[in-house]
Amino acid sequence: MRYFLGLEIARNDTGVLLNQRKYVVDILSDLHMTNCAETMFLLPKGLKLSTDNGQILEEPERYRRLIGRLLYLNLTRLDISYSVQHLSQFLVQPREPHWQAALHAIQYLKSTVNRGLFYPSHQELHLEAFCDADWGQCAFTSKSLIGYCIFLGKSLISWKTKKQKTVSKSTAEAEYRSMSYATSEVVWVENVLKDLKIDVSNPISLYCDNKAATHIAHNPVFHERTKHLDIDCHYVRDKLQDGFLLPQFVRTRQQLADIMTKALGGQHHKELSVKLGLVDNGECPA
């Protein structure tokens, strides 16, 4: 297979590269932005979008169609996961600032049109996960945004940006809930691998950049700091006690899931993209 539903597959002895270059080029062409200026940022710095400010688009369907195409592009371009989630909140009544922000994201895609996910051929088959949360990120509901990514060896196999269902009362709670979401996904991935007769060694490392959240997982006696947490959140602690999971602290600069919960500077965004396995065609190992 070389091309399937907008997905391009390139193989060599070192691995497989998945990208959607033609799909991005088609988006640029349809928007008449083939020769547009390029940018390193997905969303403009300091951008604050609202459901009330700005003129309502006369043709809201063009905004909805563009966001739908970006959602499909997220199959291989996890670096746009945060911006797509953010822009998806305005589908009901899109306004001019929302449209301009979406076009800014297209300018970013123009500068990274050749980027895709690389999967090495030779690697150890062990699981590890990263999870992160941006506390109270939603300006409308005060709900937190969570993100996680799961690796099989050096290959990224699962990721998501998602708004939490309930409001978290603290940063620690938001981060702990993100650990719970990630743990559920890790359990599902391991079951899929078992069906494929692939054994995964335990415990599986789960990296979080909040020390309080990792302490809560390791220490059930936190009284005042944990009495407001729902029982289902302690799913993480149960998996830790079973020897399935090992929550570990990682510095924010090395937190790979950070790219899925907030807008980052151009250089930091690129660094995390590379660590997640996103490379350009010319950078793919020969």
Image (cartoon, rainbow, N blue to C red):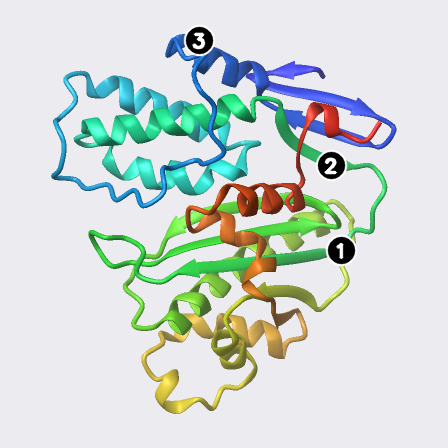
Q: Position of residue 110 (x, y in %)?
A: 50, 21
Q: Earlier in the sequence, mark 3 or mark 1?
A: 3
For image coordinates 73% across by 67% down, the residue present is 202
Q: Position of residue 143 (x, y in %)?
A: 29, 58
Mark 2 to mark 3 CA distance (whole Å): 29 Å
In the image, residue 45 above or below residue 209: above
In the image, residue 254 above or below residue 222: above
Q: Secondary structure at mark 3?
A: helix
Marks 2 and 3 in Cβ contact (< 8 Å) = no
Mark 2 to mark 1 CA distance (whole Å): 14 Å
Q: Secondary structure at mark 2?
A: strand
Give the residue at mark 3: 29
* Dot 3 amino acid type: Ser
Q: Position of residue 37 (x, y in %)?
A: 44, 19
* Dot 2 amino acid type: Tyr
Observer able to see residue 268: yes
**Mark 2 or mark 3, which is nearer to you?**
3
Marks 2 and 1 in Cβ contact (< 8 Å) = no
Tell whether 259 sits left or right of 96: right
**Mark 3 or mark 1, which is nearer to you?**
3
Tell whether 43 sits left or right of 126: left
